[in-house]
Image: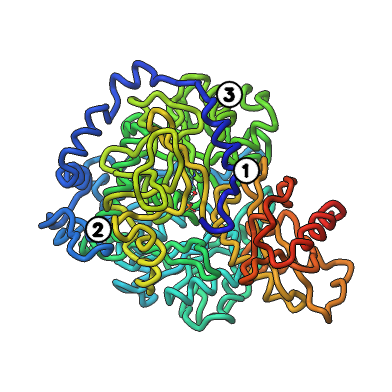
Amino acid sequence: MSDQSTGPSSTEQTISNLLKEERRFEPPADLAASANVTADAYDAAAADREAFWAEQADRLTWATKWDQVLDDSNPPFFKWFTGGTLNASYNCVDRHVEAGRGDKVAIHWVGEPITGGADDTRDITYAQLKDEVSQAANALTALGVSKGDRVAIYLPMIPEAIVAMLACARLGAPHTVVFGGFSADALASRVDDCEAKVVITSDGGYRRGTPSALKPAVDEARTKTDKIEKVLVVRRTGQEVAWDDAVDVWWHDAVGSASTDHTPEAFDAEHPLYVMYTSGTTGKPKGILHTTGGYLTGAAYTHHAVFDLKPETDVYWCTADVGWVTGHSYIAYGPLANGVTQVLYEGTPDSPEPGRWWKIIQDYGVTLFYTAPTAIRSFMKQGSEVPDSFDMSSLRILGSVGEPINPEAYVWYRHVIGGDRTPVVDTWWQTETGAVMISPLPGVTAGKPGSAMTPIPGIEADVVDDEGRSVPNGSGGYLVVTSPWPSMLRTLWGDDDRYVDTYWSRFKKQGFYFAGDGAKKDEDGDIWVLGRVDDVMNVSGHRLSTTEIESALVSHPKVAESAVVGATDPDTGQAVVAYVILRNEAGDGGPDIIKELSDHVRSQIGPIAKPRQIMIVPELPKTRSGKIMRRLLRDVAEGRTVGDTQTLADASIMDLISAGQATST
Ligand code: WT7
């Protein structure tokens, strides 16, 4: 474990708290009686994994059936459903229309503004979605996009985001969706890395009642990368935008005037579907590559199994942003491949009123709800009065994703939002895994608050020690996946070596996938995910790299050196705390130095990376070999007594830093 790993004190504390958890929640009898997946699925999948996955792949419509389920001839470059061909967009849209479900609502879109009683909403049927996706595919073709070209999508939570993704998939043009909260720099570096020739954006989107601009960031990104040939702009807010006739094209012109006829081509199962950038342990984000057949199989199967999806009656809502993998697998691909009706909401949970989410659940009769612990904790703080004033009796399953859900938040979620009827599925997975890996099954598992429980049928995962040996029940170690799975990442875009290094070198001998998380098996063998064991932080369920933020800080002219740690935070899970040494010539940095540095991180990466606290320090604690001991800095940031300083080159430094902490604001 590196220094960033959960330090012994806090890990031990967490574990002992967790082991006291004795509450159990059995599945409701009616849900269990009609569950999509029953207990025997675990054994069936284990007995013949390939047959099991072939059955799951049959949920999709293939143009050509595969020859081989798993090609493991060149590990860790696994291939799934080789020889098979299909089109992801066809699977998410056309086939539902062909099956006579064209009039079914695919998306209940809810815009954030509520203006004069006339809500900003739109219902989109599968037939309409098919037309729009076809139009967008035709428009992209006219802009020069063809099979294999990359397209960046930088949009708010509006239907066009889904349409754009599906249009790219339809053309076999891998998309890379960049979260709208990322800065121009972050956008430019992603566009540059995967050489995206078209960017799809909008003038802006609504955030807490005010229009927030997006197009200017794309304009700025164009000054930092020369890869962008065309920018397709959705008009959402009506804000003023700068316009370059040679590059900018309005969506309503190009897409609006395009034909609604488009014949999707079938692509190889291993054809790239998308690249999703995520933070790693170095400054450079990793481009996680997902391909078509295995990914879509994983997304569709898990959505069916983990949410016990009944497409004829369920109304599903996942509150994630399409800029993250959750929005890819559990808004765009899984749910639409399964033909659901889902809610898509543009804005913030409490805008314009604190009960906005609960009102949406009530208005649309949402039955399956999927959100993140950070949101649950922030609602918990406000109390139950607001949610109690809405009728949420339609809900039947609640999901959680992104970070460990603390038992109190789990119980509150189940009780206040779920009326004590609904199972809570705590789903562990990652951008890399493409789909849920460890989770209760709502009709099978007796839920334990705080535990993600066991790998779902078809998935094999374990907790192992340093040598890769399975730890006994009651012990902790590293979370690994012990055999390949269809929705696994295939590589990192343009960097096979880093792919092998990051995920497959730690337990090379065993051939295990190293997830980067620490975990514990309890006495029953159920898994409790404890958090990252590498230099990756989890802030409000968003993944941030300490190194990336450090690089951003060091790129400021007044900064000589910096160290960033993720400190436990009651609201956001972890929060960014930065220690900064200023350059000599910067003196004390001036009166606004903290704000200056904070704004700088914001502009380099985005608001999500903004430190909760920045401390100007004279020195950083380093080992004799010059390695920063982040563990000690985390002790300070979390207000603990500073741990063992024996390996420090100069132990007095920690006294200076701790003293500074007492007076810093
Ligand atoms: C990391 C992956 C999965 C989509 C959203 C985040 C943490 C995720 C859980 C959970 C405990 C969790 C892990 C993981 N994580 N879900 N249910 N319990 N930890 O995707 O940005 O790729 O982050 O999020 O640390 O490694 P991501």
Decide which of tag 2 and tag 3 comes sooner along the chain.
Answer: 2
Q: Residues within 10 Å of mark 2 (few under 14, many from 20)?
A: many
Query: Dot 1 corresponds to which residue?
Result: 9
**Which element is circle 3 on?**
helix
Query: Dot 2 corresponds to which residue?
Result: 87
Where is residue 358 drawn, in percent x and y?
58, 31
**Residue type pointed to by label 2:** Asn
Where is residue 59 drawn, in percent x and y?
22, 43
**Which element is circle 1 on?**
helix
Decide which of tag 1 and tag 2 comes sooner along the chain.
Answer: 1
Where is residue 310 drawn, in percent x and y?
32, 31
**Which element is circle 2 on?**
loop
Query: Dot 3 corresponds to which residue?
Result: 416
Residue sitting at the far right: 591
**Residue type pointed to by label 3:** Val
Q: CA distance from mark 1 to mark 2?
A: 50 Å
12 w.r.t. 151: above or below: above
Q: CA distance from mark 2 to mark 3?
A: 41 Å
Circles 1 and 2 in contact, beta carbons < 8 Å? no
